[in-house]
Amino acid sequence: QVQLVESGGGSVQVGGSLNLSCASSGRDFSSFAMGWFRQAPGKDREFVAVISWNGDASRYGDAVMGRFTISRDNGKNTVDLQMNNLQREDTAVYYCAPFSGRNYYRGVPDSGSWGQGTQVTVSS
């Protein structure tokens, strides 16, 4: 089973940037599409971004399109999320996860394979 550890969260002002990173200890990391989702207090889980197993394709949630960029390094078993022009509504705990099969298109993370998350707080 894949074990995931997210890092890179923090507190920034509106308009600032952060780069999140997710490290995997799983042997089959390069076999899965990987992505990020977020959850804010009192809100539903929200799809952020996903990248194909080889990095050739990616999809983004409407709320982050044009501001966030997802990338992966299969040699290092990592997937990153560069977040620019952060807004207060981006405040949430960010999680990385595999998005296998149809979940890639549905923007739904695979269950049971999430990290502990990393907190992102954006203030004005």
Image: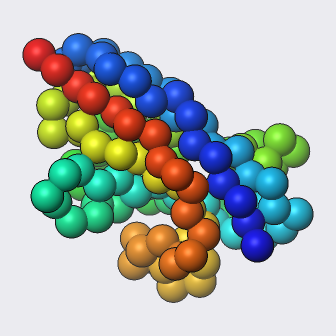
Tell me, yes or no, if residue 51 can be seen here. no
Q: Residue at x 23, y 25 (%)?
A: 122
Number of numbered discs present? Answer: 0
**Vertical arrangement, residue 5 with respect to residue 51, above or below:** above
**Vertical arrangement, residue 54 with respect to residue 80, above or below:** below
Near-viewer residue (41 or 16): 41
Tell me, yes or no, if residue 77 can be seen here. yes
Apparent side of residue 64 relative to residue 87 in the rendered image (left or right): right
Q: Residue at x 52, y 28 (%)?
A: 8
Apparent side of residue 84 relative to residue 7 in the rendered image (left or right): left
Q: Residue at x 70, y 45 (%)?
A: 23
Residue 70 point in image, percent of width and height: 53, 44
Residue 51 point in image, percent of width and height: 57, 57
Q: Locate the C terminus by quadrant.
A: top left
Q: Locate the N terminus by quadrant.
A: bottom right
Apparent side of residue 120 relative to residue 112 in the rendered image (left or right): left
Q: Residue at x 19, y 52 (%)?
A: 41
Instruction: Name the colouring of the figure.
Output: rainbow
**Vertical arrangement, residue 10 with respect to residue 103, above or below:** above
Quarter of the image where one finds residue 18: top left
Near-viewer residue (91 or 30): 91
Quarter of the image where one finds residue 66: top left
The single residue placed furthest to the bottom in the displayed view is 102
Residue 114 point in image, percent of width and height: 55, 63
Residue 72 point in image, percent of width and height: 68, 45
